Image: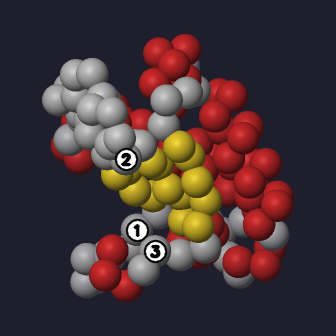
Amino acid sequence: MRPDAVPPDDFDELVRRALDQLPDEAAALVAHIAVVVREEPEPDEVEPGTLLLGQFRGIARTVAGDRVPGSLPDVITLFRVPILRVCRSVDEVAPRVLKVLGHEVGHALGLSEGQLRAYGWY
């Protein structure tokens, strides 16, 4: 799908709605994580031959204890253009945004790619 089919402001609203749909446990975690939208990842953020829809940067909750003062915040980034590219219609965008957000929340919880696939958050 063409990126102009869902303008940035509309995409941001879909992200807000997806945040509201997260289960309570995930929503409590995300309350302490910055969630941002970028148009596309930088070339050095993407493995060759892959498509990056979202990214978690931070310390997974399975390893993080108390945060060290002055440490950078955890961040979930959703990439608007790649997400739109994998959707065939506007109707597919909201469910895809929720799935990508859930996937990245899973990483924040310390889940591996294999575990996320098993839960259907791939």
Label 3 sits on residue: 41
Q: Going from the N terminus, do you reach mark 3 or mark 1 first?
A: 3
Label 1 sits on residue: 52
Q: Amino acid at mark 2?
A: Leu
**The disc label shown at residue 84, or none:** none
Label 2 sits on residue: 72
| SS class, disc 1 | loop
For label 2, count other residues whose C-alpha is less than 10 Å away and answer few (under 14), some (14-19) or many (20+): few
Mark 1 vs mark 2, foreground winner is 2
For the residues bearing labels 3 and 2, Cβ distance under 8 angstroms: no
Marks 3 and 2, how far apart in space?
19 Å
Residue in view at x 63 percent, y 46 percent: 95
Q: Is residue 14 left or right of residue 76?
A: right
Q: Going from the N terminus, do you reach mark 1 or mark 2 first?
A: 1
Which is nearer the eye, 56 or 118? Answer: 56
Residue in view at x 40 percent, y 56 percent: 55
Marks 1 and 2, how far apart in space?
22 Å
